[in-house]
């Protein structure tokens, strides 16, 4: 991957040296737009990951609450059953 990126950058540098000023401007603009697109895509991906993590956290929290409630209910029922059997 690094060799490919290095070769691409080297090729871009050689292409810039051989191009007219107008072509260089167009290429520089295209490279800048590509960078902006990558930045936007990365930001959107980060937002999606963050939202997914938030949803997962809420699900885990709700599940933990449900388990805690079930344990408390079971313990209360067991206590009541013990009380009732000792009377």
Image (spheres, grey):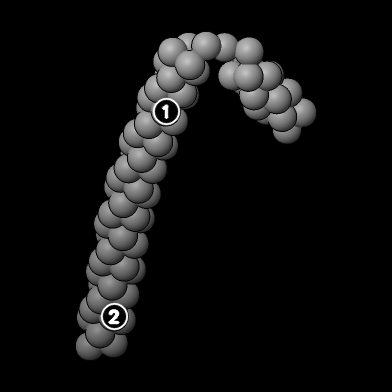
Local secondary structure at mark 2: helix
* In front of the other: 81 or 29: 29
Q: Is residue 2 left or right of residue 69?
A: right
Local secondary structure at mark 1: helix
Q: Residue at x 40, y 36 (%)?
A: 39
Q: Is residue 17 left or right of residue 41?
A: right
Q: Which residue is mark 1?
A: 32
Q: Residues within 10 Å of mark 1 (few under 14, many from 20)?
A: few
Residue 78 found in image quarter: bottom left
Residue 26 found in image quarter: top left
| Vertical side of 23 occupied by 13: above or below | below
Instruction: Residue 8: give x, y in percent of width and height.
Output: 67, 22
| Vertical side of 69 occupied by 23: above or below | above
Give the numbered dot on residue 79: 2
- Residue 13 shows in this picture: yes
Q: Residue furthest bottom?
A: 87
**Contact, CB < 8 Å: mark 2 with mark 1?**
no
Q: Residue at x 68, y 19 (%)?
A: 14
Give the numbered dot on residue 71: none
Alpha carbon separation for disc pair 2 and 1: 70 Å
């Amino acid at each position: 991957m690094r060799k490919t990126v290095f070769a691409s950058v080297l090729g871009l540098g050689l292409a810039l040296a051989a191009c007219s000023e107008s072509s260089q401007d167009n290429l520089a603009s295209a490279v800048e737009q590509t960078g902006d697109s990558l930045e936007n895509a990365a930001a959107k991906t980060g937002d999606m990951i963050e939202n997914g993590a938030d949803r997962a956290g809420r699900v885990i929290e709700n599940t933990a609450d449900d388990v805690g409630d079930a344990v408390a209910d079971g313990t209360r029922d067991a206590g009541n059953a013990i009380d009732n059997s000792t009377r």
